[in-house]
Image (cartoon, rainbow, N blue to C red):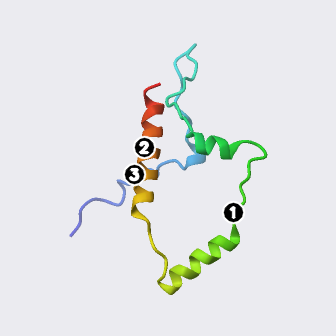
Amino acid sequence: MKIGSFDNKLSPAPVASERKPPAAPSGAMAQASAKVELSATVSAMAKPGADTSFDKAKVDRIAQAIRDGKFEINADAIADKLIANAEELLAGRTR
């Protein structure tokens, strides 16, 4: 079944390096399109000199407890922290 002729080929699309960015209107300045805010926790971690270390012994104890099937999950503590994080996030939106 012949659908079309081989002579009617489309030219290939330009590769990314050949594409030109769209031109901005003359005299127009680029404007920020999104505002990004970091949570207090992330901001504290991003500060120079912030302690980004972790307790390897604690991680090893938890990993071993998981492997042994003895790790217990405290659903109340997880729920409390999720709610606190959600409240922090929502409080940032109302500013």
Q: Is residue 54 above or below residue 38?
A: below
Which one is nearer the viewer's eye here, 19 or 80?
80
The secondary structure type at the circle numbered 2 is helix
The residue under the point 64% across, 76% down is: 60
Q: Residue furthest top?
A: 27
The residue under the point 61% across, 45% down is: 42
Give the residue pinned by disc 1. 54
Give the residue pinned by disc 2. 86
Lower sequence index among marks 3 and 1: 3
Q: Is residue 25 above or below residue 19?
A: above
Badge 1 density bin: few <14, some 14–19, many ≥20, Cα 10 Å? few
For residue 1, side relative to residue 55 (left or right): left
Badge 2 density bin: few <14, some 14–19, many ≥20, Cα 10 Å? few
Q: Quadrant of residue 43?
A: top right
Tag on residue 10?
A: 3
Q: Quadrant of residue 20?
A: top right
Measure how far apart labels 1 and 2 are at the Cα level: 25 Å
The residue under the point 69% across, 73% down is: 57
What amino acid does circle 2 point to?
Ala
Whether tag 1 and tag 2 are in contact, CB under 8 A, the answer is no
Which one is nearer the viewer's eye here, 64 or 3?
64
For the N terminus, which image quadrant? bottom left
What amino acid does circle 1 point to?
Phe
Q: Nearer the viewer, mark 3 or mark 1?
A: 1
What amino acid does circle 3 point to?
Leu
Q: Is residue 30 above or below residue 68?
A: above
Lower sequence index among marks 1 and 2: 1
Q: Nearer the viewer, mark 3 or mark 2?
A: 2
- Find residue 4 and report its horizontal and vertical position in percent: 27, 59
The residue under the point 43% across, 39% down is: 87
